[in-house]
Amino acid sequence: MHPDNAATPKPAARHEHGATPARFPVLVDAALRAAGWQPGRWDIKQAEIWADALREHTSPAGHRHTVFPAAVEAWAEFGGLTITPSGPGRQIAPATLHLDPLHGLHHARTLGDLGRALGTEICPLGEETDTAAVLAIDSEGRVYTLDHTGDWYAGPDIDHALAALVTGIEPVRLTAG
C-alpha cells in the first residue's frame, strides 16, 4: 500500500524580511491554542502513561501495540487536546480531533496489519470525533487515518497532518501496489 501522489499542505509562507515562518497556518495555530496547546508544551509523564497502557494491552487474539519515539513525542506535545476547527474546510469538512491514543487501544491487529502492508510500525494517535476514524502515526512520524471507508494518508509528519485535517484538506487514500 502507498499513498497516491497528492499535494500535502505547505508550511506557512515566510514572513517579510526573511523571518522564520510560522510552524502552523494561522487557523490551525488558533485551533491548537484554543485547545490548550502552546509552543513548548511537553507532557512526557502522560505520554509514558499512554505508552505503558498500550504496551500492556493484549487483544483476545494476542495482538499487541508497538510503541516508538515518534508516537511518544506526538503524545507529549499534543496528547489530550481536543482540536476543534473553525470555518469551512478547503476540500472536505474539517475534522475535530481528540488526540488520545487510547481511542486506538482495541485496534492493535488493524494497526499491525496496516504497518506490515506499509513496511513500518504503526501506533494509535487519537480519533476524529465526528466519524470515529482512528488516527495513527508510524515510526517515521507519518500520520494516517483509518475509517469504515478505508485507510488514508494524512501527512508526512504530525504538523502537516494536523494542518490538513483541521483545514479540511482531503487525505490521500492508501492503495495496494
Image (cartoon, rainbow, N blue to C red):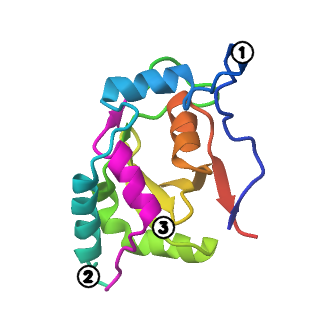
* Sooner in the amino-acid sequence: mark 3 or mark 1: 1
Indicate yes or no whether the magenta region holds residue 67. yes
| 2 or 3: tag closer to the N-terminus | 2
**SS at badge 3:** strand
Quadrant location of the C terminus in the rendered image: bottom right
Depth check, front residue: 167 or 16: 16
Q: Mark 2: which amino acid? A: Pro
Report the span colored magenta: 62-84
Q: Is residue 164 above or below residue 88?
A: below
Where is mark 2, residue-wise? 60
**Callout 1: 10 Å neighbours few (<14), some, many (20+)?**
few
Question: Is 71 placed above or below 79 here?
Answer: below
Disc 2 element: loop
Compared across the picture, whether 114 is left or right of 67 comes to right
Front: mark 2 or 3 = 3
Separation of disc 2 and disc 1 at Cα? 58 Å
Residue at figure coordinates x 38%, y 70% from the top left: 67
Counting other residues with Cα less than 10 Å from the Cα at mark 3, is it few (<14), some (14-19), or many (20 or more)? many
Mark number displayed over residue 122: 3
Q: Nearer the viewer, residue 139 or 88?
A: 139
| Residue 140 as seen in the image, left or right of residue 34 | right
Neighbor class of circle 2 (other Cα within 10 Å; few <14, some 14-19, many 20+) is: few
Residue 150 in view, yes or no: no
Look at the numbered disc 1 and give the secondary structure of its residue: helix
Establish if 86 lies above or below 122. Answer: above
Closer to us: 120 or 172: 120
Pair 3/1: label in front: 1
Kind of residue at disc 3:
Ile
- Give the residue displayed 49% in from the left and 17% down from the top: 87
Q: Amino acid at mark 1?
A: His
Coordinates of residue 25 in the picture (x, y in percent): 57, 25
Q: Please provide percent x and percent y for residue 85.
A: 44, 25
